[in-house]
Amino acid sequence: MQGFRPHYDFVQAIKPISSSFAGALEVDLIRKERKDEAAPSIINLIKEFKEHYRMQQVASSATPANNSAFATLGNSNSNLDSNGNSNSNSKWNKICVCGLKH
């Protein structure tokens, strides 16, 4: 293989793993090829991808696994009387997704 063919094969191989990185790499390769620039080292591209992937894994593990900002907590109507008014005598002992009782 010669030229940019191995690079485009690499782009196709990583596309299911990181389409954003693959897309950016593909645009960069097209520009270099049109300008008749030398093909970048495939070894360096693999190293860059590994670093990108590692950083994505760290970033995703640092954020909460679920985005429960708008989660409902069962039947919220349990504190309402038959007229739909708030029943201040009832105790609601459910724990919120934030970890506190409300």
Image: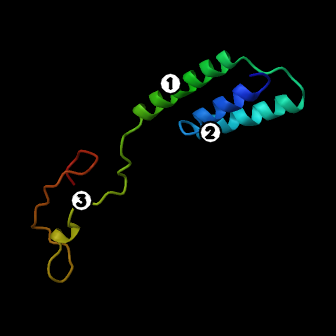
Which is nearer the eye, 14 or 67? 14
Residue 12, quarter of picture: top right
Residue type at tag 1: Arg
Cα–Cα gap, marks 2 and 1 = 15 Å
In the rendered view, would you say 73 is above or below 95? below
Which is nearer the eye, 19 or 79? 19
Residue identified by numbered label 3 = 73
| Residues marked 2 and 3 touching at CB (< 8 Å) | no
Percent x, y for residue 22? 64, 35
Residue identified by numbered label 2 = 20
Residue type at tag 3: Leu
Disc with the residue nearer the chain's start (3 vs 1) = 1
Percent x, y for residue 62? 41, 32
Which is nearer the eye, 77 or 40? 40
In the rendered view, would you say 93 is above or below 76? above
Residue at image coords 36%, 57%: 70
Looking at the rendered image, the quarter that the N terminus falls into is top right
Q: Is mark 3 on a helix, strand or loop?
A: loop
Residue identified by numbered label 1 = 54
Cα–Cα gap, marks 2 and 3 = 36 Å
Looking at the rendered image, the quarter that the C terminus falls into is bottom left
Disc with the residue nearer the chain's start (2 vs 1) = 2
Residue at image coords 67%, 39%: 23
Residue type at tag 2: Ser
Q: How crowded is mark 2: few (under 14 residues within 10 Å), some or many (20 or more)?
A: few
